[in-house]
Amino acid sequence: MQILVTGAAGYIGSHVVKQLLEQTDYKIVIIDNLSTGFDSTIETLKSLDTTKSRIKFYNQDLSNWSEIEKIFEENCIKEIIHFAAFSQVAESMKNPIKYYSNNTINTTNLINIATKYGVKKFIFSSTAAVYGEVSSENIPIKESLITNPINPYGSSKLFSESIIKDVASIKNDFKYIILRYFNVAGADLDGKVGECHNPETHLIPLVIKTALGKRESIKIFGDDYDTPDGTCIRDYIHVCDLADAHIEALKYLDTNESDTFNCGYGYGYSVKEVVEMVKKVSNVEFKIEIEKRRVGDPAVLISDNTKIKTKMNWTPKYNDLELICKTALEWEKRI
Ligand code: UFG
């Protein structure tokens, strides 16, 4: 049986494919247009396939509907993990159409083709951005909290969630798992794949680049929040634990119904704590500048992960900020 992974040349997708190769027998069809992912990542994944026959890569854009349909005709795809999407909040505010076109319209088309070709399981990469600004009494955030995205990125993912649910409600054999990621960080422990965004906007890789002298300073966006040290608090989840949640989600659907799960550790670190941890693991002092708040940053985002831990057989293995920063540092040294 073949599984389709879209966006496998990207950060999270590449870690999931590596784990699929290591932990399962799936033959893997990859669709990626390499717009934000890298050909070299596909080559790395192929090099990890000891059989040399488990990965089939299509350099294709999901908006080329007829070409995507041909891929379904050529293969026997019954399961999908769908990552291909744009994911920069600030860019989505400047160019919403880009986000709705790729993240929502292309997802709709993919689901349409998937149901036509008898796909049974659909794992969807969603985000904590669907919750929007969350008041302190709703932290940690439960999946049942009302969704209220405050940027087109979050909205584009939430629309896709609704479309997936609506289709599943009329197609009994089409099941889904929606995974809402909190702050994904770190890299593969073997150092084969890791995070590489252009431009990079995420805190941990930016602090690490600063420690390695690739940037002059790290800017802290606001130290006047209502948090213990005044900086924002986030729930950082190691990318390998997140990848594992996708594998567990596939198994879960064998005997359970469609559902939505938060992916996080249920614990938060402040920006200053992250900066201190990077100093510790790199043993480098670097320049820190306090800037004004970044628009749209909520003070605290922490998941309630009770549901995924109790309903799905997901047990985090790397919930350790030091390990997250160390693996990210090792990866950044390589690139
Ligand atoms: N930050 C800085 N300086 C930087 C970069 C970030 O101080 O140079 C701060 C931010 O203000 C924020 C925290 O570090 O308080 C984390 O910021 P990131 O940009 O790393 O991550 P976000 O929390 O903004 O967003 C991430 C994903 C989104 C997703 C969101 C959901 O990038 O796609 O988590 O929680 F929607």
Image (spheres, rainbow, N blue to C red):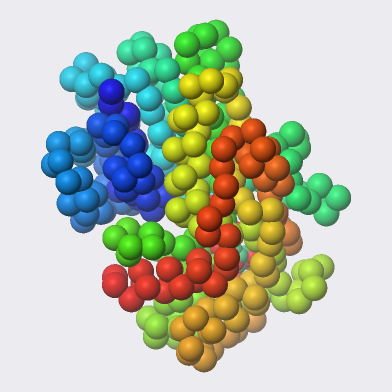
Residue plotted at (73% across, 41% down): 142
Nearest the viewer among 145 and 68 is: 145
Q: Where is residue 82 in the image (x, y as percent from the top left)?
A: 41, 34
Residue plotted at (65% across, 75% down): 273
In the picture shown, does residue 291 fall above or below 300? below
Q: How many labels does the image show?
A: 0
Q: Image quadrant of residue 136?
A: bottom right
Q: Where is residue 298 in the image (x, y as percent from the top left)?
A: 71, 57
Say which quadrant the N terminus sits in: top left
Residue plotted at (31% across, 45% down): 22
Tell me: 69 left or right of 172: left
Q: Position of residue 237 (x, y in %)?
A: 56, 56
Say which quadrant the C terminus sits in: bottom left
Q: Image quadrant of residue 306?
A: top right
Residue plotted at (25% across, 54% down): 41
Can residue 238 be seen in the rendering of this structure?
yes
Tell me: 168 left or right of 7: right
Q: Where is residue 261 in the image (x, y as percent from the top left)?
A: 62, 37
Can residue 112 be seen in the rendering of this structure?
no
Q: Residue furthest right?
A: 137
Q: Image quadrant of residue 289?
A: bottom right
Q: Which residue lies furthest to the bottom in this view?
A: 285
In the picture shown, does residue 104 fall above or below 37? above
In the picture shown, does residue 272 fall above or below 327? below
- Quadrant of the image where one finds ligand 1: bottom right
